[in-house]
Amino acid sequence: MDGPLKNLLVVDLTRVLVGPYCTMILSDLGARVIKIEAPETGDDSRKFGPFVKDQSAYFMSLNRGKESIALNLKNEEDKKIFEKILSRADILVENFKPGTLEKWGYGWKDVCKKYPKLIYASASGFGQTGPLKDLPAYDMVVQGMGGLMSVTGQPNSEPTRVGTSIGDITAGLFTAIGINAALYDREKTGKGMFIDVSMLDSQIAILENAIARYLSKNEIPKPMGSRHPSIAPFEAFKTKDSYIIIAAGNDKLFEKLCEHLNITECVSDDRFKTNSMRCENMDDLKKIIEDKLIVNNTDDWIKGMEKLKIPCGPIYNIKQAVENPQIEARNMIVKSYHKIIGEFKLAGNPIKMSSYKDENKRGDIPDLDEHRDKILKEFS
């Protein structure tokens, strides 16, 4: 891939999701990524479903455009190969449990002495410090401990996991952000640095309204379904055939909505005059709105509201979301190639840059150890 990170070499010591997601972003931005995998087994996610012709679609969705070589970092000969690659690398990304690479002689303190310009990024469940640093973590563990599950779901429902692995993905994103900031810093100082990203920290960082409410008002937020705690009307409303999302986030939009629904009396109603009042009386307002919406289908309401620029939308399933013409127009479903299954479709990169073309074709998906001969020849 052509991109702003072209000519940078990333050594990818990651597996499953948080690390591979980070290095996939770096690859999409133009970096060369050499994925170091465990001999025989490779990345654990190679065994995760769903499968296409016995190949993991999970693995393929995260590792396009990378090169693979299998190395045992406990083996002296393999360590020599690894160090030759590392000596020319710009970035090392790993998501082992803290302390693992130190045991193998590749902790930050050891590596930075040999390669002072190297940017070394570690993503882990709880980070490199603190009383929980040695514990393992998976996505749902940090969703629970980070407070996210406590504000997800319907009121009084059982604990509900967010429907994607946001614990891993946010940490992967923050790691990629940290790496790019470190690259800029290296341009000024000539030195690399260590980046420590925790999945749990990342969950705290994205709590926005919930954490603001607790830290400023000492309120402990609870699940509210689709409702926003500080803006109204701002949730899913039932129509004749399904639901519509309406996000009238200010007084002007609320007035437009009331005019469109022929409920203009609500604008001057003491219960709904301001956003704060609407939040306090959301149940009453919701009933009034749904009594109007129930007479027409969602698509009909959306067409009318879009003309008035009232923020709204349907609730799509994954098929509908992926096949949305807007998604096609934004090149958000791209193609890669695997030598066994052929063409494979994946989610694209949402970062669009004026200086680089957002190609529909991504790099090939690697088999385990596929690039051994090429890499050994290059780094001999």
Image: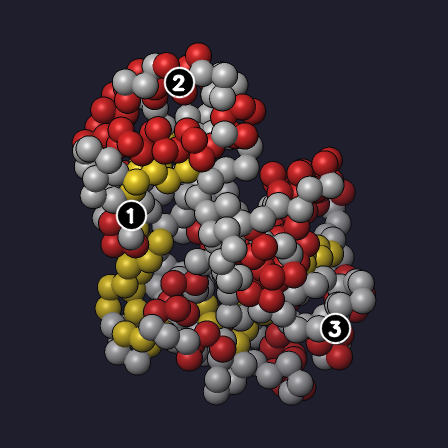
- Looking at the rendered structure, the secondary structure element under dot 3 is loop
Q: Residue 116, percent across and down?
A: 76, 57
**Kind of residue at badge 3:** Asp
Q: CA distance from mark 3 to mark 2?
A: 56 Å
Residue 196 shows in the view:
yes
- In this rendering, position of residue 295 left or right of residue 176: left
Residue under the point 24% across and 49% down: 320
Q: Residue 237, percent across and down?
A: 34, 38
User: Which one is in front in this view, the residue at disc 1 or the one at disc 2?
Assistant: 2
Q: Residues within 10 Å of mark 2 (few under 14, many from 20)?
A: some
Residue under the point 48% across and 53% down: 153
Number of numbered discs = 3
**Kind of residue at badge 2:** Cys
Residue under the point 36% across and 33% down: 287
Vertical placement of residue 202 versus 246, above or below: below
Q: CA distance from mark 1 to mark 2?
A: 30 Å
Residue under numbered circle 1 = 316
Answer with the quarter of the image where residue 115 lies: bottom right
Q: Are marks 3 and 2 in contact (CB under 8 Å)?
A: no
Residue under numbered circle 2 = 266
- Looking at the rendered structure, the secondary structure element under dot 2 is helix
